[in-house]
Image: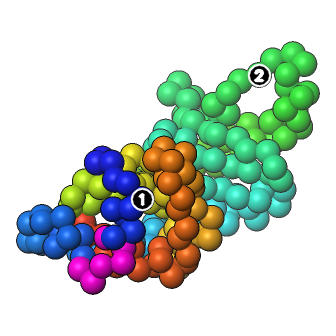
Amino acid sequence: MKSISYTEFRKFLDSDVDEATYFGCNKDNLISMKKYLVNLSNRFELCENKIKYDRESIKKKYKQIDLIIYSKDIRSVVVSMGKTFFSLIRDSKTGFYIPEDIFSGEEIYLYKKLKLLLIERIGKQFSKELSHIKNETQKYFAKNNIIESVSGTFGLEDFYNGATLFCGNYELFDIDKKTYIPYEFTFEQFANYYKEKSELSIKDKQKLLTKIMVPGGFLN
């Protein structure tokens, strides 16, 4: 991605034109980052609905499970119990799902052995459901996971229930994928990398999302 100073970034943000016009780019088949996020949210909900039954089946049987989410690495399914997260991958020999990190000896007890044994049991009993969750993950993250804006100045990386906006290769702020609303916290990329002060309000961030332009073809 192209670097940009905070001074130039602010001029663009305060201007009355979109990214393509400001940076002199071809405007054919472009959409705003906001519209892109709306489409991303819709696809996310479709994926969630397809795996809803599988997720609820596991949680109904094992009420200790808090979350079952998929990972953008496409290899694993993440299951959490309290503050403990397990990444499950399919064993090619047995077809069962096993914890990605295998511990032994005292390390097992440090990692809560009972929870680990429960996760291994789930990986055997619900291998079909976990496979379906992983397969739908592959369809969801197969495209539109990372996109760069028309000028190459901005980018967006898609995660499970959120997305991160980048500017000049550095994280700028996170966005709630369901509401399209940016989080209040701003990564201090300009202060850290350009020795300039970055002050971005939620309103600034929302405006920025309507000004950044990306290829509309990514919606297909």
Real-space Cα separation, disc 2 to disc 1, in angstroms: 47 Å
Which residue has dot 1 on it? 6
Q: Nearer the viewer, residue 194 or 136?
A: 194
Q: Position of residue 121 (x, y in %)?
A: 75, 40
Q: Say whether residue 90 is left or right of residue 100.
A: left
Residue at image position (36%, 78%) is 14
Tell me the quarter of the picture where residue 183 sits: bottom right
**In this rendering, is residue 188 above or below 7?**
above
Residue under label 2: 103
**In-image side of 103 versus 161 (left or right):** right
Image quadrant containing the C terminus: bottom left
Residue furthest out toward the top: 105
Q: Amino acid at mark 2?
A: Phe
Stretch in magenta: 12-17
Relative to 193, residue 36 above or below: below
State the residue at coordinates (65%, 56%).
Answer: 68
Q: Amino acid at mark 1?
A: Tyr
Where is residue 23 drawn, in percent x and y? 18, 64
**At which x and y percent is residue 52?**
58, 68
**Residue at 12% across / 64% down in the picture?**
25
Q: Tell me whether circle 2 and circle 1 mark residues in contact (CB < 8 Å).
A: no
The answer to whether residue 134 is above or below residue 88 is below
Q: Earlier in the sequence, mark 2 or mark 1?
A: 1
Q: Position of residue 118 (x, y in %)?
A: 81, 42
Q: Is residue 190 left or right of residue 26?
A: right
User: Is 199 placed left or right of 208 in the picture?
Assistant: right
